[in-house]
Image (cartoon, helix red, strand yellow):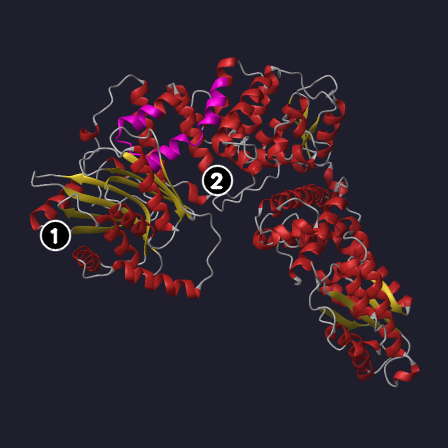
């Protein structure tokens, strides 16, 4: 870890300048001096102070001949004014003067100060003003005013600096009722632009919500004397973010605030942390402390400003929520609304009421109100060491379910419980997933926030199930096993079983919750990766679920989990597949006989027409249908699968003389050549007129960019690909080389192909997981063709940047492959994708 581009090449030149040893001393400090932390930042600030003071002294000395000798002061503002310098921080400097010097003299003095800074390669934000000009600039520009609140004298006339500081604080406190809303709007704008720091994989340590800018804003609010932030842990959290930024500056050699993925391991090492995940958790915890403090503070600012806006003479004449602080509205036993918050009633006795905190939280969420900080702290203090008896009383369990069932308003209440430290006492298991990052780009949230978001989504589905309490608790716990050894669903089931028992659920309900956690991925994985016409598939799901009631809950949990994951995890098409699987499993659990796969999944009229056309012409036939993104299909699509698709285009291809080696890779290759991305695909064999089988390929595709190709061009290229006149592999390789020259490949895990044992009695299932890429399906199809197997059906699923595809293959006689042969085929496919 080294500081880059700090010391000028010509050290001899610097030795003759004022403070000429500064570059070397700075480098020594950052490399070998004070350990990282507040002491080093302060030491760097002091070293820089001395250097700049020497520059000003030299520039104003009589021997300088020209620049101003008196009536000037050099002032640090902003972060430098606070005495906090990170290795690559810019220097915020204000040159004050009393207005008596000539403009040319001031310009010459400024040059003698600014140019050495620039020569050293440091960024500089500078201004030259009189105290009156500085005051006017602050009135016109909020950022200037905030910077002056941290003004610190460096050199020159201290009375000038004192005058500016005094005026800055006076003006700030007088204008706070007007300027604080402006500051809040700036904070909200930054949050919308840069996101929430506690949940970002590549957070901006300064600009994102919960970052260093928010911490600075809280200092400004405190300086206004109108409100103050919760102090517990705030300074420590800010110091940790500054330490992380210091390590980031030294690691990258750049003045950056973005904690990029490629830098995280090095930054973690510089901070003495074991890995990048530990760094992110460390960062998220600090950011949550700042974000919570900001939320509470701005809420208090709003309350104070609302109260000040009502004239005392009129306040007693008004009614309703705006009538002032004395108006209380009951929410629950021991809980009332006061000034837009849920607070404890005067008669509440938390030391005698162990359920009061959960009741207050549930009441706040149901009313859409924040839960007052002092209410949480009072309850926590009254129940120190024993928040609730074990197992929980029925009312406590019901209040937790009520809190979760409030939906989105439950999130800020939950965050407040966590920030005040009571959540870990209520649910000790939560600590294991708290602030745990998820490095899958499909996921929007950290593990703990994802669990809360899943409960929020599940709250909207409680009308679909008979036991909404089990659904909400399972939603809250479904990923509780993440970060533990082994399969997170299996590990989570054990944790969920213990947790549910402690919450007071009976043995039967506890087992249902554990089963939901254990199988929370079962429906979506089966629906998108397995042949739903195979009775073995439906039977396996029915055996795992066990009862219609559990299936009903699992269906709702599956949808809630996917919706809370991110936009790539759920779609009308995926929902339809899961619903179709649930219908079949419901019939099986109800005792309905399993249908024969040869008699199920009847083709639609459009598919039959296309297959007949291919049989009669002896040539490929295809249709291309455009759909609204999330709208209903057009009239060309019929049948039970017609409801909402995740993509805008459906492509049907019918090729005669099945089995026909090369059809799958040829069709996939042609689509890739036409820049069509395959979102989903299915293969099946039809023989509508008894003239011989036709291979039907049903694709859901989207144009990578530009407009869709014409169906005639697709058909012509498919014919050429099948007769060998179009060299698809060569064309794709040429395009891949050109693409590689224009882009930098993202890091991705290596592809993997495995045999899914026990998935089907009539075929061998080869499951492929790989980074989605141009021509991926083409390469898989070529590998399967080269292995001499027949593809009976294929189920293609694309989730974000990952493809998870399942291929049902047989030998030439239509039988499943022997185990050794199946493993060889899987290895060949995996090798082809390397």
Q: Main secondary structure of the magenta part?
A: helix
Question: Which element type, helix, strand or loop, lies under badge 1?
Answer: loop
Q: Nearer the viewer, mark 2 or mark 1?
A: 1
State the CA–CA distance, disc 2 to disc 1.
44 Å
Against 555, residue 687 (above or below) is below
Image location of residue 754, percent across then percent down? 37, 39
Q: Considering the image in quadrants, where does the N terminus appear?
A: bottom right
Extreme residue toward the front, this view? 820
- The residue singled out by tag 1 in the image is 619
Magenta stretch?
511-540
Image location of residue 580, percent across then percent down? 31, 31
In the picture, measured across the screen, residue 270 lies left or right of residue 107, that is left
- The residue singled out by tag 2 in the image is 565
Total number of numbered labels?
A: 2
Image location of residue 526, percent across then percent down? 36, 33
Residue 723 in view, yes or no: yes
Q: Quadrant of residue 169?
A: bottom right
In the picture, measured across the screen, residue 275 lies left or right of residue 586, that is right
Against 513, residue 257 (above or below) is below
Is 646 within the magenta? no
Marks 2 & 1, CB-CB < 8 Å contact: no
CA neighbours of label 1 inside 10 A, class few (<14), some (14 to 19), many (20+): some
């Amino acid at each position: 870890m080294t500081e880059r581009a700090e010391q000028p090449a010509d050290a001899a030149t610097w030795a003759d300048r004022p403070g000429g040893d500064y570059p070397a001393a700075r480098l020594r400090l950052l490399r070998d001096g004070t350990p990282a932390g507040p002491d080093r930042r302060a030491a760097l600030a002091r070293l820089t102070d001395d250097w700049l003071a020497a520059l000003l002294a030299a520039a104003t000395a009589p021997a300088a001949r020209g620049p101003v000798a008196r009536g000037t002061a050099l002032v640090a503002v902003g972060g430098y004014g606070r005495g906090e310098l990170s290795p690559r921080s810019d220097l915020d400097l204000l040159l004050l003067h009393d207005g008596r010097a000539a403009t040319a003299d001031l310009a010459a003095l400024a040059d003698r100060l600014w140019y050495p800074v620039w020569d050293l390669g440091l960024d500089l934000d500078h201004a030259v003003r009189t105290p009156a000009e500085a005051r006017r600039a602050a009135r016109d520009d909020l950022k200037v005013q905030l910077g002056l609140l941290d003004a610190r004298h460096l050199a020159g006339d201290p009375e000038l600096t004192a005058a500016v500081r005094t005026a800055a604080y006076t003006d700030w406190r007088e204008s706070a009722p007007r300027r604080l809303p402006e500051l809040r709007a700036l904070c909200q704008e930054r949050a919308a632009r840069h996101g929430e720091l506690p949940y970002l994989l590549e957070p901006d340590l300064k600009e994102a919500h919960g970052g260093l800018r928010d911490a600075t804003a809280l200092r400004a609010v405190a300086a206004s004397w109108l409100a103050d932030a919760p102090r517990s842990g705030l300074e420590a959290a800010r110091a940790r973010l500054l330490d992380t930024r210091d390590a980031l500056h030294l690691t990258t050699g750049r003045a950056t605030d973005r904690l990029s993925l490629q830098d995280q391991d090095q930054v973690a090492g510089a901070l003495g942390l074991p890995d990048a995940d530990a760094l992110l958790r460390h960062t998220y915890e600090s950011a949550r402390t700042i974000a919570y403090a900001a939320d509470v503070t701005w809420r208090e600012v709003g309350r104070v400003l609302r109260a000040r806006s009502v004239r005392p003479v009129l306040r007693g004449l008004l009614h309703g929520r705006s009538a002032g602080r004395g108006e209380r509205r009951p929410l629950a036993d021991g809980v009332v609304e006061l000034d837009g918050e849920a607070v404890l009633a005067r008669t509440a006795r938390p030391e005698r009421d162990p359920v009061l905190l959960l009741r207050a939280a549930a009441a706040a969420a149901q009313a859409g109100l924040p839960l007052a900080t002092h209410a949480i702290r009072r309850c926590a203090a009254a129940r120190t060491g024993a928040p609730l008896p074990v197992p929980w009383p029925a009312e406590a369990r019901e209040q937790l379910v009520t809190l979760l069932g409030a939906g989105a308003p439950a999130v800020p209440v939950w965050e407040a419980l966590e920030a005040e430290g009571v959540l870990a006492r209520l649910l000790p298991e939560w600590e294991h997933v708290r602030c745990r990052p998820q490095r899958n780009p499909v996921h929007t949230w950290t593990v703990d926030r994802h669990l809360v978001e899943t409960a929020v989504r599940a709250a909207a589905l409680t009308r679909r199930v008979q036991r909404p309490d089990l659904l909400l608790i399972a939603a809250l716990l479904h990923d509780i096993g993440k970060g533990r050894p082994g399969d997170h669903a299996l590990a989570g089931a054990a944790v969920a079983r213990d947790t549910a028992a402690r919450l007071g659920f009976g043995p039967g309900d506890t087992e249902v919750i554990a089963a939901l956690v254990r199988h929370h991925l079962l429906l979506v994985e089966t629906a998108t990766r397995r042949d739903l016409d195979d009775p073995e598939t439906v039977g396996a799901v029915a055996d795992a679920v066990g009862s219609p009631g559990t299936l009903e809950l699992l269906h709702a949990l599956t949808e809630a989990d996917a919706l809370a994951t991110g936009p790539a995890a759920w779609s009308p098409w995926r929902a339809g597949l899961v619903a179709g699987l649930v219908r079949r499993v419901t019939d099986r659990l109800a005792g309905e006989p399993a249908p024969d796969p040869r008699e199920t999944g009847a083709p639609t009229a459009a598919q039959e027409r296309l297959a007949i056309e291919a049989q009669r012409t002896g040539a490929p036939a295809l249709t291309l249908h455009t759909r609204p993104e999330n709208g209903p299909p057009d009239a060309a699509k019929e049948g039970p699968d017609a409801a909402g698709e995740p993509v805008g285009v459906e492509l049907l291809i019918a090729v005669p003389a099945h089995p026909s080696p090369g059809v799958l890779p040829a069709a996939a290759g042609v689509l890739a050549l036409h820049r069509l991305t395959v979102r989903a695909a299915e293969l099946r064999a039809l023989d509508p007129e008894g003239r011989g089988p036709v291979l039907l390929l049903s694709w859901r595709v989207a144009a990578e960019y530009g407009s869709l190709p014409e169906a005639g061009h697709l058909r012509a290229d498919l014919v050429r690909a099948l007769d060998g006149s179009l060299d698809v592999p060569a064309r794709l390789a040429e395009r891949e080389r050109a693409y590689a020259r224009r882009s930098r490949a993202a890091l991705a895990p290596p592809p993997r192909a495995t045999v899914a044992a026990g998935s089907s009695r009539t075929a061998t299932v080869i499951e492929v997981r790989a980074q989605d890429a141009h021509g991926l399906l083409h390469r898989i199809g070529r590998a399967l063709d080269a292995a001499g197997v027949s593809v009976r059906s294929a189920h293609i699923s694309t989730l974000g940047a990952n493809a998870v595809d399942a291929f049902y293959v047989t030998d030439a006689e239509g039988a499943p492959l022997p185990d050794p042969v199946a493993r060889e085929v899987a290895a060949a496919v995996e090798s082809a994708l390397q």
